[in-house]
Image (cartoon, grey):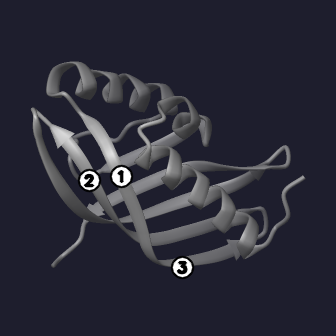
């Protein structure tokens, strides 16, 4: 059973970022609760659940050639509040879109909740990072 510690949340966050960076969609989406919601600066609408995000990801792959080639997290902060934790970090993602590779720098907030002994992400908010 996971503990309510910064180290346990950091482990969950690191696993999520590693799965994303490896473009391991099964492992990545397994880190989110089914009822997780998502706010991305690159999409006009809020995504109300994990299934909506999975469909969007599949569309990006099919239509845009979307592929993640790597992801690094830096300047992370964790705030615990009972069985909930807020993880905020800077993220740099090496990705491919339409045959072109680029590095995107963003800020991200992920809210984790301890559910049945597992830290799952229940909310993600991504915004551009000023250079």
Confirm or deny contact between disc 2 and disc 1 (CB under 8 A).
yes
What kind of element bears circle 3?
Answer: strand
Q: Is residue 20 above or below residue 128?
A: above
Q: Is residue 70 above or below residue 44?
A: below
Residue 106, quarter of picture? bottom left
x 58%, y 68%: residue: 86
Considering only order in the chain, which callout, 1 or 2, is on the residue closer to the N terminus?
1
Q: What residue sits right under mark 3 in the picture?
A: 77
x 42%, y 27%: residue: 54
Residue 9, quarter of picture? bottom right
x 43%, y 75%: residue: 74
Label placed on residue 93:
none
Q: Residues within 10 Å of mark 1 (few under 14, many from 20)?
A: some
Q: Residues within 10 Å of mark 3 (few under 14, many from 20)?
A: few
Residue 5, quarter of picture? bottom right
Q: What residue sits right under mark 2 in the picture?
A: 94
User: Rounded to the nearest whole Å, what is the CA distance between mark 2 and mark 1?
Assistant: 5 Å
Q: Residues within 10 Å of mark 2 (few under 14, many from 20)?
A: some
Q: What x and y, as percent, mark residue 94?
A: 26, 53
x 51%, y 59%: residue: 110
User: Rounded to the nearest whole Å, what is the CA distance between mark 1 and mark 3?
Assistant: 21 Å
Q: What residue sits right under mark 1 in the picture?
A: 70
Q: Is residue 121 above or below residue 9?
A: above
Considering only order in the chain, which callout, 2 or 3, is on the residue closer to the N terminus?
3
Q: Is residue 114 left or right of residue 10?
A: right
């Amino acid at each position: 059973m996971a503990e309510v510690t910064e180290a346990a949340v950091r482990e969950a966050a690191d696993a999520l970022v590693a799965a994303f960076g490896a473009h391991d969609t099964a492992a990545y989406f397994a880190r989110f609760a089914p009822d997780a919601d998502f706010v991305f600066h690159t999409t006009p609408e809020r995504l109300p659940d994990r299934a909506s995000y999975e469909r969007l990801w599949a569309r990006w792959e099919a239509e845009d050639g979307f592929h993640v080639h790597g992801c690094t997290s830096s300047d992370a902060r964790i705030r615990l509040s009972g069985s909930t934790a807020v993880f905020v970090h800077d993220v740099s993602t090496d990705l491919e879109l339409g045959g072109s590779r680029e590095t995107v720098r963003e800020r991200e907030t992920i809210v984790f909740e301890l559910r049945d002994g597992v830290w799952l992400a229940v909310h993600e908010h991504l915004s551009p990072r000023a250079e």
